Amino acid sequence: MNFFQFLQVLRGRRKIILMTVAVTVLTAFVVSLLQPKVYKATTSLVLNYKGVDPVTGMTLPAQLMPGYMPTQVDIITSKNVATRVVDELKLADNPEAKEQYLEATHGRGTIREWLAELLLKNLEVVPSRESSVLDVSFKGSDPKFAASVANAFAGQYQQTAVHLKAEPLKRVSGFFNEQAKMLRQNLEQAQQKLSKYQQEKGIVNADTRMDVETNRLNELSSQLVQAQAQLMEATSRRANNGGASPDVVANPLIQTLKAELARAEAKFSQASQNLGRNHPTYIGAKAEVDKLRAELNAQIGAISGSVASNARILQQREAELRAAFAAQKSKVLELNRARDELSVLIREVENAQKAYDSATQRFNQTSIEGQANQTDVAVLNVATPPATQAAPKIMLNTFLAGILGALLGIAIGVLAEMIDRRVRTANDLVDVLDAPVLGVIDWNQGRKNRFNAPALYANRPLLTN
């Protein structure tokens, strides 16, 4: 069947097609009129949410959480929110609702849950694709009731969001409270340990005392070096002690005595040459020489003894300074070790203080957030009783019924044509008789031109003698 034959079939079966379209349209129109009117009220919500980790305090925008919007849709359509709406609107106290509940469930379950399920069946939540807006819609036969239910769902969703946000924060606040108490005990123990160590070691300020003791050690070191140099010099002088000693030679008194002794010896030598041993002058000169020599030897012995005594004193001082330096060095090393231990204790106190401050800060923050009744959900548009019905849509239903009726009528017409096949065109005659068409009579033209050659069917072979 080509397209021209199909059009001829539609033309021949037009009564059936038109009747089918008319019946379908009329039926859809009547059914639409008989259906109860349904009104749709919509409340628009704006979600301005930032996810905060209660432990770390890190903020994560909701746009980075792909499951955030579906989660909010699930919360709104949850039975928890629906039962809250039932309680808010006091639907369970309605006598008609109680009768319907008993007829439908025969007393099984609770009326709150039954009403919640009925409300959820007529509830529709549509999130926006490119924004944080949620449309909460409810369909009902009463426009005022539909608006009140939509607004009730929005309000209960806000309260549920606050509860879901505050309840974990309260538990986390309790956790931080316990942690803060434990960290405070750790801080007190660290402080007590530090104070006890300072009292035992007598340390008020380790750095200041360390500077004082180090300066004292440096001073002792300088004195020890100086004493060692003096001791080496004194030891060398004592080793070379005698008449040729530099101390003896450089002594002015020794030099004077040597000069006087030289003059006296010269005088005595002259007297010994000119005078006899018993001569008073000889005796006097000899006595003077012996006196000066004895005095010179006494002075030399005194100077030598002074050098030896000085060496012994310097040796004793060097030993004392060495012992003091060793003691001071041990003291500095002990103080250095004590300062290191004190630094460790101080760091423990500082770390305990930081941990306690951090836990206290998080506890205060979570405690305040847990007690806050603020929500991140705001109502953008409040649902109002709709002026027009959302369903049934009579014009749309009628239009769709006309299209469906036309398709159904065409199908019925083609089916009827297949059951009762008729010759409507020359091609149909050729298909049925399998014979060539010699001519076609067009009854719409004049007598002279009624019989025309079948030019349209030249593709079929003609019989010839």
Image (tube, rainbow, N blue to C red):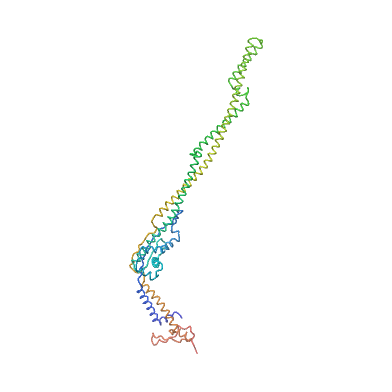
Task: Please name whichever residue, 123 or 30, is drawn nearer the observer in this view of the structure.
Answer: 123
Vertical position of residue 383 compared to residue 427: above or below: above
Quadrant in which residue 251 is drawn: top right
Q: With respect to residue 181, does 378 lie above or below?
A: below
State the residue in front, 324 or 270.
Answer: 324
The image quarter containing residue 297 is top right
Q: Is residue 145 left or right of residue 434?
A: left
Residue 316: x %, y % from top left: 58, 29
Q: Residue furthest front?
A: 107
* Observer-nearest of 437 and 132: 132
> Residue 444: x, y in percent?
39, 85
- Point out residue 21 in the picture as x, y percentages from the top left corner: 38, 78
Place residue 326 in its image quadrant: top right
Residue 38 versus residue 248 in the image, above or below: below
x and y percent of residue 347 in the render?
Answer: 49, 45
Q: How many marks?
A: 0
Quick one: which residue is furthest to the bottom in this view? 465
